[in-house]
Image (tube, rainbow, N blue to C red):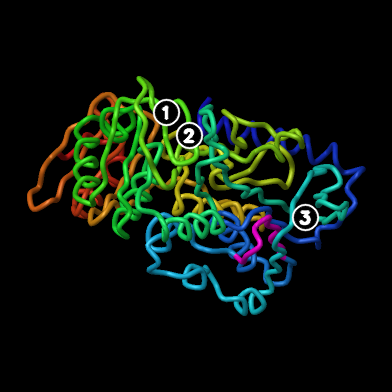
């Protein structure tokens, strides 16, 4: 199905949903916008809607007990005690009042009634909406490892990061399970504050399957420069108090364990409401519209169509979530802005600053170009088309890559 066909089908289903709900809707169009979730997608939706609808109510409902905050520092600056909880607030408390955005913290949304245009909170309270944006994000995957749920830290929110930081203050050693970017960032941060840290992962080098052998070897070098040990090609069989047990009878004594084993979309609320999912995420078109009237989704919970790629491109990164939230907020206010940007993200591992742009859903081959003095670019292609690029200290190649990816041209490297 093409992007245009996907969009038409999505809108057709939404129109049918709207027609079915006309007789049971209990709130009027002046109910405004309700956003579930306070991450970048949620705040982006609320802010954009407020700009376009100055007089309509805007409410953010979040299970978090804090106002919206910046999450990327949790595995880096915050963990290293270089920033505080106040430093990572996205806006000060007064800003929400000035912009007439109501944020209700510590609130659990239990269900959505799309026909009535209401959400029900824990305790039974109902909140009406004219438009609803789901920005519920994702939750850590708890792997099927004996004891991991009892003895490992998972990092997803500020409370998790605070608990980990407090524990690290008294720790001499740590094991991080998983070599994704969050795992690498956490490991490098722990090592930088004097905690002897080891990453254990099934891949011989970090992120080999996702980014290729050459990129993985460079990431391994960044970890080693940061003082992190890496044990690859292993499986974790159990986590116990003070020890991580690997396959083959190997045991690693440790003061703390962090499980950085991926995330899963928090799409249960949408699924229960009958909203269509795609591979476990909320299916939306390039305007962030679901197939249910007046319901939108953005960020880690969504599987959006990218107009440039011509297919669904799920993402898990801050900038993309924020952009999708803004698009959802605009659509809720009656303006269509298609998501057509190439997804991007960045990561700091020790002293290395990594940037990536691309579709992130596979490639045929990769090619590393060493620019010297620590700068490099890894080009990813499918056929003759650039589909991604990873750079380190090489902003020129990064900007070129984004243009080549968007224009579906061959790599420059």
Q: Is 384 placed left or right of 164 in the picture?
A: left
Q: To which residue does mark 2 refer?
A: 239
- Rate crowding at label 2 as few (under 14), some (14 to 19) or many (20 or more) other CA atoms within 10 Å: many
- Rate crowding at label 1 as few (under 14), some (14 to 19) or many (20 or more) other CA atoms within 10 Å: many
Q: Is 259 placed left or right of 289 in the picture?
A: left
View extreme (left): residue = 372
What quarter of the picture does the C terminus occupy? top left
Say whether marks 1 and 3 touch (CB < 8 Å): no
Place residue 76 in its image quadrant. Answer: bottom left
Q: Position of residue 359 (x, y in %)?
A: 38, 37
Q: Position of residue 86 (x, y in %)?
A: 51, 73
Q: Is residue 260 magenta?
A: no
> Residue at 62% across / 37% down in the picture?
282
Residue bounds of the magenta highlight:
58-67
- Rate crowding at label 3 as few (under 14), some (14 to 19) or many (20 or more) other CA atoms within 10 Å: many
Q: Position of residue 134 (x, y in %)?
A: 66, 48
Label 2 residue SS: strand
> Residue at 73% across / 53% down in the picture?
131
Label 3 residue SS: loop
Image position of 3 with respect to 65: above or below = above
Q: CA distance from mark 1 to mark 3?
A: 48 Å
Numbered disc in front, either 1 or 3:
1
Q: Position of residue 303 (x, y in %)?
A: 55, 37
Magenta portion: prevailing SS class: loop
Say whether marks 1 and 2 touch (CB < 8 Å): yes
Place residue 329 in its image quadrant. Answer: bottom right
Q: To which residue does mark 3 refer?
A: 130
Q: To which residue does mark 1 refer?
A: 236
Q: Along the line of sight, which residue is nearer the eye, 172 or 376?
A: 172
């Amino acid at each position: 199905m093409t992007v245009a066909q996907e969009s038409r089908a999505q809108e057709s289903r939404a129109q049918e949903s709207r027609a079915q709900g006309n007789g049971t809707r209990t709130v009027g169009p002046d109910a405004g916008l309700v956003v579930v979730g306070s991450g970048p997608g949620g705040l982006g939706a609320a802010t954009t809607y407020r700009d376009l609808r100055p007089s309509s109510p805007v409410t953010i409902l979040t299970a978090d007990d804090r106002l919206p905050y910046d999450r990327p520092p949790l595995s880096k600056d915050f963990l290293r005690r270089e920033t505080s909880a106040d430093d990572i607030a996205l806006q000060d408390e007064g800003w929400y009042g000035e912009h007439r955005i109501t944020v209700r913290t510590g609130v659990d949304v239990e269900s959505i009634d799309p026909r009535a245009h209401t959400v029900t909170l824990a305790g039974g309270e109902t909140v009406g909406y004219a438009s609803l944006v789901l920005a519920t994000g994702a939750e850590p995957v708890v792997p099927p490892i004996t004891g991991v749920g009892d003895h490992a830290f998972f990092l997803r929110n500020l409370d998790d990061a605070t608990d980990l930081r407090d524990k690290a203050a008294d720790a001499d050693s740590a094991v991080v399970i998983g070599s994704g970017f969050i795992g690498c960032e956490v490991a490098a941060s722990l090592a930088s504050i004097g905690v002897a840290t080891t990453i254990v992962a099934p891949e011989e080098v970090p992120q080999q399957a996702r980014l290729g052998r050459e990129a993985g070897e460079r990431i391994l070098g960044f970890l080693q420069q940061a003082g992190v040990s890496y044990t690859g090609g292993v499986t974790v069989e159990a986590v116990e108090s003070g020890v991580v047990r690997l396959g083959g009878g190997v045991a690693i004594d440790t003061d703390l364990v962090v499980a950085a084993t991926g995330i899963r979309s928090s799409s249960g609320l949408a699924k229960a409401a009958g909203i269509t999912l795609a591979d476990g995420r909320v299916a939306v078109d390039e305007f962030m519209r679901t197939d249910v009237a007046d319901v939108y989704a953005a960020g880690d919970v969504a599987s959006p169509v990218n107009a440039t790629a011509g297919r669904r491109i799920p993402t898990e990164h801050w900038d993309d979530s924020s952009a999708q939230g803004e698009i959802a907020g605009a659509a809720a206010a009656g303006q269509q802005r298609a998501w057509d940007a190439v997804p991007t993200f960045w990561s700091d591992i020790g002293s290395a600053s990594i940037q990536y742009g691309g579709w992130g859903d596979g490639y045929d081959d990769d090619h590393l170009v060493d620019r010297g003095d620590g700068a490099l670019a890894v080009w990813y292609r499918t056929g003759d088309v650039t589909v991604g690029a990873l750079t380190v200290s090489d902003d020129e190649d990064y900007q070129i890559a984004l243009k080549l990816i968007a224009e579906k041209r061959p790599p420059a490297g």
